[in-house]
């Protein structure tokens, strides 16, 4: 094996290892304790989804008529999220929460309620 191949291999390995440490999340991955947190930190797509969720949460807190309710709902959702034991469950949970927070900021448009 040539020096170039060994050097390239080491450099590539360092890039991969560094990428795990630089995942963007809404929390400190060095303090990740639950399966959910550890999985989000280890998975780039979940990490991006977590960042999207954090942005939606900050917007909802800023724009919601009742920011205390947004906080309470978020804490409850975190408890539910931590019941996930698979990546698929986490992805679905994060996605549905992003949607729910988006509706707090901009309620879904639909037909007006029918009055009898």
Image (cartoon, rainbow, N blue to C red):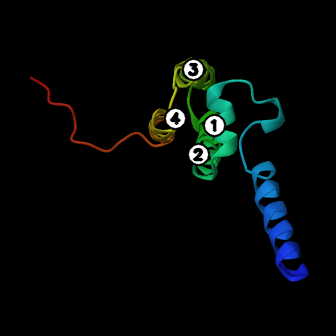
| Closer to the eye: label 4 or 3 | 4
Residue position for label 2: 46
The reply, left or right, for residue 1 in relation to residue 63 is right
> How far apart in space, not on screen, are marks 3 and 2 (Cα)?
25 Å
> How far apart in space, not on screen, are marks 1 and 3 (Cα)?
28 Å
Tags 4 and 2 touching, CB below 8 Å? yes
Q: Position of residue 72 (x, y in %)?
A: 60, 18
Marking on residue 57: none
Marking on residue 69: 3
Residue position for label 4: 90
Q: Residue at image x 73%, y 50%?
A: 24
Residue position for label 1: 39
The reply, left or right, for residue 94 in relation to residue 30 is left
Q: Residue at image x 71%, y 44%?
A: 25
Q: Position of residue 2 (x, y in %)?
A: 86, 81
- 27 above or below 84? below
Q: Earlier in the sequence, mark 1 or mark 3?
A: 1
Q: Earlier in the sequence, mark 1 or mark 2?
A: 1
> How far apart in space, not on screen, are marks 4 and 2 (Cα)?
8 Å
**SS of the residue at dot 3?**
helix
Q: Quadrant of the N terminus?
A: bottom right
């Amino acid at each position: 094996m040539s020096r170039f191949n060994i050097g390239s291999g080491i450099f590539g390995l360092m890039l991969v290892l560094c990428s795990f440490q630089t995942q963007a999340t809404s929390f400190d991955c060095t303090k990740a304790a639950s399966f959910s947190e550890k999985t989000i930190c280890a998975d780039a797509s979940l990490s991006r989804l977590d960042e999207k969720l954090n942005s939606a949460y900050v917007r909802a807190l800023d724009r919601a008529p009742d920011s205390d309710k947004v906080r309470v709902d978020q804490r409850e959702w975190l408890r539910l999220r931590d019941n996930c034991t698979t990546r698929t469950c986490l992805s679905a949970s994060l996605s549905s929460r992003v949607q729910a927070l988006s509706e707090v900021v901009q309620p879904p448009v639909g037909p007006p309620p029918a009055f009898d």
